[in-house]
Each structure stands twice: as C-alpha cells, then as structure tokens.
C-alpha cells in the first residue's frame, strides 16, 4: 500500500467490529484496509486459555449458522479460529503486527494514517495511508486499571490472567469483583493453587447481570470451591501494599491483614486508549464503566466528520453489537461516497 492511494475506508482493529466492517466494505465495493497492531481478534486471544465464552454462537458468529462449537458455547480457541477463517475464507484485506501511531486530517481529502510495524526479524518499518473515512474499532483492554499501591510493579503482579498451571500449590490472590476475576479465582482454585479472592461486598452481593454481576455459571462452581474449603473470599476495603512474599490489605471491618503470597492478579477492569481520537478532536464523555467517545447513535460518526467508532469501547459493548453496527453504518458511508462522486 502506498501513501498515494486514497482508500474509501480505513479500519483500525481486527476484532469482530473491524472484521464486520471489512466484510461490509467489500460488499459495498469500497476500497478498504484493516490495520491491527496485534493479531486477528487480539482481545479474545488475551482471554484465559480454554475459556468458555459467555455468549451463544448466534451472538458471536460472523455469518448466521457458521459457528459450530463442540458444546453450547464456544471456547476461546473455537472463536479465534472462527474469526481467523472468516478473514481467510473471504480474503479480507487485514494487516497485522502494524500499529497506528497517528491520524491527522488531510488538507485535501480525508485523513493521513501513520503506522509502525515490526517484522518477525525485528526490522521496523513506518507506513503512511490516506483514507476518506476512518473507523476506530479496537478493543477496550489497552490499559488495565491499577490499584496504584506500593509493590504493584513487582514481577509477581499481573493485570491479565492467562492460565492457572504455573501456580499449582502457590499462594495466589485475585483482586476484583467481575467475571474475569471470578473466573481467574475459580480456575486457580480448581487447578491446585491456594487461592484467595479479595472482593468488595457490593460486588459479592450483586446478582444483577445488567449491573455487572458475575454470571451464575461462574458463581455456582465458585461457591462450591468455597464450601469445600479450597477457596477463601475476603471482603475488603483496600489493598494497601504488595511485598515479595505477602500482601497487606484492610478488610471491610477496618482490620489490617497480612497474607502470605506468591502471585497477585489485579483484575479490576481496563480502558481503551483514546489518545489518537482525542488528538483528532473527538469529544468524549463518562460512560457506564469508563470514558467513551461521543457519537451519533444512528451513524456512529463522531463530531469529527469522517471519523467513526464501533466495538467494545463504545456504549454498544457486546460482541453482537460490534458485529451488527458496521453492517448498519458502512452502507451509509458507501451511499455518502457515491453521492459525493456524482457531484
């Protein structure tokens, strides 16, 4: 791709939203390119190994009836394979391992998108693309939230959970109250880690799925681990300090506790990187969980003409919405481009 070619549509992110947008752009006859700094479905690839998804196939598949998991819900690996083969089978124009470093308004037409990529042999290359429209379709896991306490930068502290097997017979602490934290605590406990889960009372007592309560199929086995004495739950107020061999916390009654510890998982959510969007002048606002870009609810266009958003970092957070939104807005973009071409 040369900097001289003007694309109709450039898509940043190769998750479900980006792939759906690419598919819709191809169907509309638009010139397009998807740029992904990681891998296809990179956010899903960062889920725990072997994780069963919370959603059913009809909410995750790129084509109706095309996802056929072994059980009722697909695993991480089945879903990754589904999205990868969607790209391969439809020959979608997706480039991976290429990071968008800047997007600027072009004085003549659209935007200039600058990227940096590193090959398998460590050589680095910078590219530049021109596009009439840009869709930001990346995930919301770029910046894991932190406790901001002493010791959080120790090597034993992790802000993502991948697998339990290195921690068999180790003292593991999981901090958090959502599904990710609950799953990590469950997997660790089931696979032989001596696990403690630190959670706020309001999160532990929350039973409302719309308010972020842990799914019942996670809570039930979690409670079984607790009842059988393999998992300890501490209702806490603050995590105060992490040391190489312990964690000091304050429980909900105000009592200070020091517990022996080998590994800590801080799983309290994450945020998207909105730096480039803000630099472009896109306005943001507080969302349900974090800051989100402001956009038109029908077109998903931001206040900057030609800049669109879709996916988990918007208010339409579910994967089903991430797939459906581009199918709605890309034909609108194509119609606008055709109208401009006839002037």
Image (tube, rainbow, N blue to C red):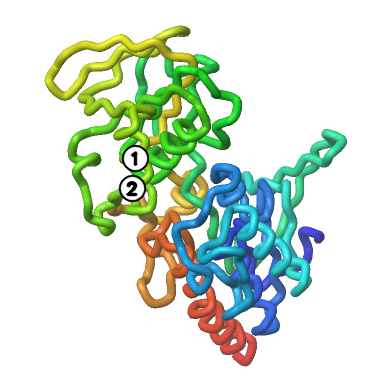
**Rendering quarter of residue 9:** bottom right
Q: Where is mark 1, residue-wise?
A: 224
Is 268 or 214 nearer to us in this picture? Answer: 214
> CA separation, marks 1 and 2?
6 Å
Per the image, label 1 sits on a secondary structure element best described as: helix
**Quadrant for the C terminus in the image:** bottom right
Return the mark for residue 220.
2
For disc 1, the neighbor class at 10 Å (few under 14, some 14 to 19, many from 20) is few
- Contact between marks 1 and 2 (CB within 8 A): the answer is yes
Q: Which residue is drawn at 52% across and 53% down?
A: 52
In this view, 55 is above or below 214: below
Residue 96 is situated, as x and y percent measured from the top left of the image, at 73, 52
Q: Residue at x 70, y 69 (%)?
A: 86
In this view, 309 is above or below 182: below
Q: Is residue 92 left or right of 178 when viewed as pictured?
A: right
Q: Is residue 257 left or right of 108 when viewed as pictured?
A: left
Q: From this viewpoint, is residue 63 visible? A: yes
**Quadrant for the N terminus in the image:** bottom right
């Amino acid at each position: 791709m040369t900097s001289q070619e003007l694309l109709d549509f450039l898509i940043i992110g190769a998750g479900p939203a980006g792939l759906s947008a690419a598919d819709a752009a191809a169907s509309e006859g638009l010139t397009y390119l998807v740029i992904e700094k990681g891998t296809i479905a990179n956010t899903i690839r960062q889920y725990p190994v072997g994780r069963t998804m919370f959603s059913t196939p009809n909410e995750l598949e790129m084509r109706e009836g095309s996802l056929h998991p072994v059980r009722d819900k697909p695993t991480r690996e089945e879903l990754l394979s589904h999205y990868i083969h969607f790209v391969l089978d439809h020959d979608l124009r997706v480039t991976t391992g290429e990071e968008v470093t800047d997007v600027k308004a072009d004085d003549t037409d659209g935007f200039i998108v600058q990227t940096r990529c590193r090959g398998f042999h460590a050589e680095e290359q910078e590219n530049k693309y021109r596009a009439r429209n840009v869709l930001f379709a990346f995930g919301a896991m770029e910046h894991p939230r932190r406790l901001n306490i002493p010791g959080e930068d120790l090597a034993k502290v992790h802000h993502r959970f991948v697998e339990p097997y290195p921690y068999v017979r180790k003292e593991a602490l999981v901090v958090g109250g959502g599904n990710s934290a609950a799953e990590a605590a469950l997997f660790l406990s089931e696979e032989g880690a001596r696990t403690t889960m630190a959670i706020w009372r309001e999160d532990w007592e929350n039973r409302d799925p719309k308010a972020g309560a842990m799914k019942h199929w996670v809570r039930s086995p979690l409670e079984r681990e607790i009842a059988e004495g393999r998992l300890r739950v501490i209702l806490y107020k603050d995590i105060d300090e992490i040391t190489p061999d312990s964690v000091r916390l304050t429980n909900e009654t105000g009592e200070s506790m020091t517990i022996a510890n080998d590994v800590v998982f801080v799983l309290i959510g994450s945020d998207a990187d909105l730096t480039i969007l803000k630099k472009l002048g896109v306005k943001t606002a507080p969302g349900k969980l974090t800051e989100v870009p402001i956009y038109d609810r029908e077109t998903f266009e931001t206040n900057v003409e030609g800049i669109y958003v879709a996916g988990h970092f918007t208010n339409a957070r579910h994967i089903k919405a991430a797939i459906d939104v581009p199918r709605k807005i890309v034909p609108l973009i194509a119609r606008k481009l055709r109208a401009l071409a006839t002037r």
